[in-house]
Image: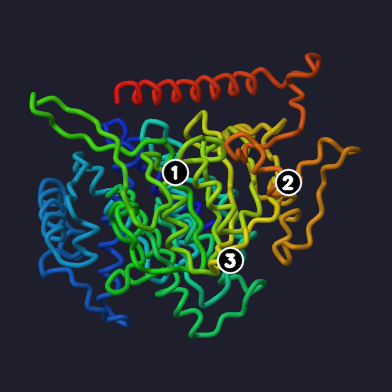
Amino acid sequence: MSEQSSAIISKVWGMCNPLRDDGVGYGDYLEQLTYLIFLKMSDEYSKPPYKKETGIPTGYAWSDMNTLKGAELEEQYKRTLEKLGEQQGILGKIFKGATNKINNAAILYRVVQMIDAEKWVSMSSDVKGEIYEGLLQKNAEDIKSGAGQYFTPRPVIRAMVRCVRPEPMKTIADPCCGSGGFFLACQSFLADSDNYKLDREQKEFLKNETFYGNELVPNTFKMALMNLYLHNIGDIYGNVPVSLGDALLTDPGYRVDYVLTNPPFGKKSSITFTNEDGEQEDEDLVYNRQDFWTTSSNKQLNFVQHINTILKATGKAAVVVPDNVLFEGGAGEVIRKKLLETTDLHTILRLPTGIFYKPGVKANVIFFDKKPASAERQTKEVWIYDFRTNIHFTLKQNPMTDKDLDDFVACYNPENRHDRKETWSEENPDGRFRKFTVEEILERDKTSLDLFWIKDKSLADLDNLPDPDVLVDDIIENLQSALESFQDLKAQLKG
């Protein structure tokens, strides 16, 4: 991270402690920063040399607020948020339902002055992006905010992008884009001169036509818009790459070359309604879509089907899925069989525990290429990289880095994935990369793709147990996982 970014992040973040004393959480603070930075950038764009029409009504611009103090500032900020929330287009989307959460007028004044002191538009998009990503990361680290569930570990995202190797002038979707992490990693890969030398047309396409996103949660949607805008993706007054809403409701109609995504955790989709007795009830939400292979209330299984729909006939996907997608019966088995039949489900990366902000998550990345319709089964073999057994990470003391996934990317062999070599053999039973034929998989109970072969050393060698804190983390993860399974079971029994 550049010195300029670090300095601004620490300055911006330094405001958070006094705000927290006033009961303003990280998420609320980040939301207020989004509004204020947006207003300041609009003000800069309205002046020479840009002279852009920003759409901000007269009397509600940054310059109407940045010289005020105390109650006057609070009142003007409140009126500005309300007015902008009534506007059409992207402006209204960013400010819809916006309210001032910084109730301490002195702190609001300091935040406004701090933002006013920077020239945001002339800062490079790298620096602006780093600042906002740094704030999103801090927000994700705050367990109380619950924002971690929208934050996929960046090394995992970057490894997925390095394997898929998106090409210029091709389209990329993320139907549950969170704060936009996959888009930014793809943009960074495409704009890297070591990968491609982009001409003007390709740069324009990358900015305005490459990305298609969806986000269900309004606050996260606002952060995604801001994050992309600061990274020079889309145009806040023109093309907006992300829409707000439930991606699973309908087929959006577009078809893309790549899907890279991490669908939300939690197996069930449900809606809450009030019954005849006036009591609140939950009901499983089942999406009846003609383009789906089967109906299910399991969110991740529905996302896998949705991803298959929005891919072009030659499209490629890399998707983070929890373990249950690999072994669950019923709809899970139907979907796995269909994937093996109609796509080339060529690679699975078993991810280690301790890398997600939500404890107890056991996840994998599945890579599959869609194929034009054919009577022949498209998957011939599945390569599995076990990066979970005997691997331990923690978010604070031992976080995962890009380097940790270098061996997987090398084994994946993105330059030519048809020329791969197993690292597992009878002589090397601890090799992490192993190939299974589709016939072997189809013979397994429920066509399970939950395959592992390396011995767990902590079970076999009592003299070499992991550190106590690693053991404790493992116990917590397993208990959390068990608790979620029981909660699912309870919900099913109630249903």
Q: What residue type is labelled 3?
A: Phe
Please say if 93 is above or below 101. below
The mark closer to the camera, 3 or 1, is: 1
Residue situated in front as seen by the camera: 101 or 256? 256
Amino acid carrying mark 1 in the image: Gln
Q: Nearer the viewer, mark 2 or mark 1?
A: 2
Judge whether residue 447 can be spotted in this image.
yes
In the rendered image, the residue lying farthest to the bottom is 200
Q: Nearer the viewer, residue 40 or 278?
A: 278
The quadrant of the picture occupied by the N terminus is: bottom right
On residue 172, which mark appears? Answer: none
Please state which of the two labelled residues, at mark 3 or mark 2, is closer to the viewer. Answer: 2
Q: Which mark is residue 189?
A: 3
Q: Residues within 10 Å of mark 1 (few under 14, many from 20)?
A: many
State which tag comes first along the sequence, 3 or 1.
3
Badge 1 element: helix
Indicate the position of residue 406 as horizontal and vertical percent values: 72, 52
Q: How far apart are marks 3 and 1 (CA)?
A: 27 Å
The picture places residue 41, in percent across and down from the top left corner, at 31, 66
Instruction: Give the labeled residue for mark 2.
Output: 436
> In the image, is 9 to the left or to the right of 374?
left
* Alpha-carbon span between mark 3 and mark 2: 31 Å
Tag 2 secondary structure: strand
Give the residue at x 33% y 39%: 269
Q: Give the residue at mark 1.
A: 300
Give the camera-side residue of 479 and 469.
479
Report whether 356 appears left or right of 273: right
Q: Distance between the residues labelled 2 and 1?
A: 24 Å
